[in-house]
């Protein structure tokens, strides 16, 4: 019994010290929304992203491999354990249903393209991501579209180069269809 109480006290102390520091998820809500469900189409939702993807992304922003005027300064002060805490927190939040409705013609065409270009091999059959690979189902349309173009133009860095090479074979028109398809998929 005493041990349980001690563990709870420790957890509480840890929570409050974490909440006061750079790892406070409330600092992220201004842009990424409550519980990581972003309402800004240019800002990605973090809810239900694989924890490993969130921490590697934060690491890349901090180290300057991935750059963004808004996000880079947020990642700069974070220490590795804080990144892991934030990653654990957001991976456990439930993603909201997407606001985006895919065009009817993109639904079938998008599914076929995702097979053709092996998107589902890495991102998973339902595009929910795994390990260092993000969930792209139900992510914001505008954000997905911008990122796909950036990978193709090689202006967005990725952890192992796999995403950049995967997108090179995909023509611009198919990127549009894929973004429209993915943004309308259920995120869980
Ligand atoms: C001032 C706005 C702002 C704040 C505050 C902010 N972010 Fe971001 N974040 C962004 C933007 C914009 C992007 C997309 C950058 C891009 O286009 O590559 C982003 C991207 C990310 C990504 C990459 C997600 C993906 O799907 O690729 C992660 C992870 C992330 N932010 C985590 C956080 C965490 C954790 C916090 C709080 C400590 C935070 N952000 C605070 C604006 C913000
Ligand atoms: C060989 C594995 C692989 C394949 C194939 C692949 N991806 Fe990815 N994808 C990744 C990885 C890994 C990342 C994370 C990159 C990073 O930021 O480090 C990623 C990131 C992304 C992102 C960025 C999401 C975000 O939240 O920032 C989008 C969008 C995406 N992939 C879409 C696609 C589409 C569409 C296809 C098919 C045309 C595809 N991917 C094929 C591995 C893959």
Image (spheres, rainbow, N blue to C red):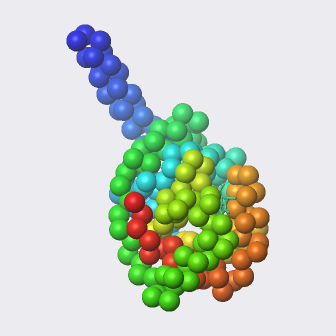
Query: In which of the image's four quarters is ligand 2 placed?
Result: bottom right
Q: Quadrant of the N terminus?
A: top left
Q: Position of residue 12 (x, y in %)?
A: 31, 28
- Number of callouts: 0
Residue 178 horizontal side relative to residue 66, left or right: left
Residue 69 visible, this angle: no
Query: Farthest left residue?
Result: 1
Where is residue 111 drawn, in percent x and y? 54, 76
Q: Indicate the quadrant containing the C terminus: top left, top right, bottom left or bottom right.
A: bottom left
Residue in the picture at 58% in, 78% down: 112
- Front position in the image: 119 or 34: 119
- Work out whether residue 145 or residue 121 is closer to the camera in this orientation and state it: 121
Residue occupying the point 39% across, 71% down: 98
Furthest toward the top, the residue is 2
The residue under the point 53% across, 56% down is 129
Q: State left or right for residue 101 relative to residue 133.
A: left
The quadrant holding residue 33 is bottom left
Q: Is residue 109 above or below residue 164?
A: below
> Above or below — where is 71 with respect to 111?
above
In the rendered image of this protein, does residue 74 appear above or below residue 154?
above
Would residue 120 appear left or right of 63 to someone viewing this image? Answer: left
State the image quarter where residue 14 is shown: top left
Residue 47 location, x and y as percent?
42, 55
Nearer to me, 184 or 146: 184
């Amino acid at each position: 019994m005493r041990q349980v109480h001690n563990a709870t006290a420790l957890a509480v102390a840890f929570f409050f010290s974490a909440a006061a520091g750079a790892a406070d998820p409330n600092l992220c809500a201004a842009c990424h929304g409550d519980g990581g469900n972003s309402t800004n189409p240019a800002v990605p939702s973090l809810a239900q992203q694989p924890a490993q993807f969130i921490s590697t992304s934060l690491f890349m922003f901090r180290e300057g491999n991935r750059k963004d005027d808004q996000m880079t300064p947020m990642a700069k002060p974070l220490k590795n354990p804080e990144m892991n805490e934030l990653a654990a927190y957001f991976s456990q939040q439930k993603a909201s249903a997407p606001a985006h409705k895919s065009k009817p013609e993109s639904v079938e065409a998008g599914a076929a393209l995702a097979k053709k270009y092996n998107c589902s091999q890495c991102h998973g059959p339902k595009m929910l991501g795994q390990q260092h690979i993000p969930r792209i189902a139900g992510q914001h349309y505008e954000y997905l579209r911008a990122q796909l173009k950036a990978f193709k133009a090689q202006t967005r860095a990725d952890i192992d180069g796999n995403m950049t090479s995967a997108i090179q074979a995909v023509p611009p028109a198919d990127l549009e269809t894929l973004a429209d398809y993915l943004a309308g998929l259920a995120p869980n």
